[in-house]
Image (spheres, rainbow, N blue to C red):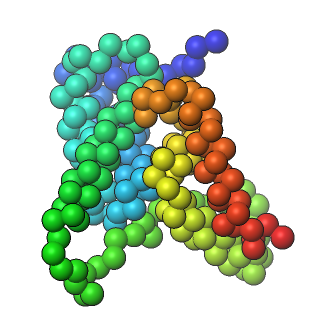
């Protein structure tokens, strides 16, 4: 059974040049793209916003040639990951060329990524524990090796299917499954003190 693409109508209208439809796509997916940038690159909010703008510029430029063979969201994530990979490579090249490091330079982080549990009210002590746990989860996700962090973010935070992740990252589905398993296993080890 094929999955309905919630962005299809807006995407088709945007392909015809409807700027309001493109704005709708931007509003639907901007936060999601920013979360991917923040999580994958461990960057601050301003950098994530800049990179998200780059993603949507590429989406706008590529819309006329988008053939709809994959869901719009899968295509969007592919573009986002390509931008993230390019930025990662740019940073790595810049880091290799760096001669000195400043102890006063700001440390980039992703303190703007929040996961808020839905549903029931909890007592303040439990709520504090949840916030501490979520902060620790974010910290642990950022400590994962790149190949595990990418797939865990796309699967567990962005809810992409294994097939979509394989398409986005251009990997065999078996590799995606293996990396997700290994990434989750590493997270379980890192989060052991909260699992008691």
Residue 79 seen from this side? yes
**Of 128 and 106, the residue lying toward us:** 106
Measured as percent of width and height from the top left, residue 33 is found at: 38, 46
Measured as percent of width and height from the top left, residue 168 is found at: 43, 32
Q: Residue at x 53, y 43 (%)?
A: 151
* Residue 110 sits above or below residue 151 on the image: below
**Of 11 and 98, the residue lying toward us:** 98
Residue 50 picture quarter: bottom left
* Residue 124 sits above or below residue 80 on the image: below
Count of all numbered marks drawn on residues in the image? 0
Left or right position of 124 against 48: right
Q: Residue at x 60, y 70 (%)?
A: 136
Q: Residue at x 25, y 45 (%)?
A: 86
Measured as percent of width and height from the top left, residue 101 is found at: 22, 80
Left or right position of 181 against 35: right
Which quadrant of the rendered structure holds the C terminus? Answer: bottom right
Residue 31 seen from this side? no
* Residue 157 sits above or below residue 70 on the image: below
Farthest right residue? 196
Left or right position of 131 against 73: right
Residue 18 picture quarter: top left
Q: Residue at x 74, y 68 (%)?
A: 192
Which quadrant of the rendered structure holds the N terminus? Answer: top right
Measured as percent of width and height from the top left, residue 67 is found at: 32, 13
């Amino acid at each position: 059974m094929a999955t309905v693409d919630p962005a299809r109508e807006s995407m088709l209208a945007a392909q015809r040049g409807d700027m309001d439809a493109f704005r709708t796509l931007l509003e639907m997916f901007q936060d999601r793209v920013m979360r991917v940038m923040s999580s994958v690159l461990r960057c601050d909010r301003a950098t994530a916003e800049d990179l998200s703008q780059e993603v949507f510029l590429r989406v706008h430029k590529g819309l006329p040639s988008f053939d709809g063979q994959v869901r719009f969201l899968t295509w969007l994530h592919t573009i986002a990951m390509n931008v993230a990979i390019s930025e990662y490579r740019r940073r790595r090249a810049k880091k290799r060329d760096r001669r000195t490091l400043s102890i006063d330079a700001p440390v980039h982080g992703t303190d703007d990524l929040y996961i808020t549990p839905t549903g029931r009210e909890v007592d303040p002590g439990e709520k504090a524990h949840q916030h501490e746990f979520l902060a620790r989860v974010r910290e642990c996700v950022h400590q994962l090796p790149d190949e595990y962090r990418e797939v865990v973010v796309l699967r567990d935070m962005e809810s992409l299917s294994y097939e979509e992740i394989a398409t986005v990252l251009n990997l065999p589905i078996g590799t995606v499954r293996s990396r997700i398993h290994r990434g989750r296993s590493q997270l379980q080890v890192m989060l052991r003190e909260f699992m008691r």
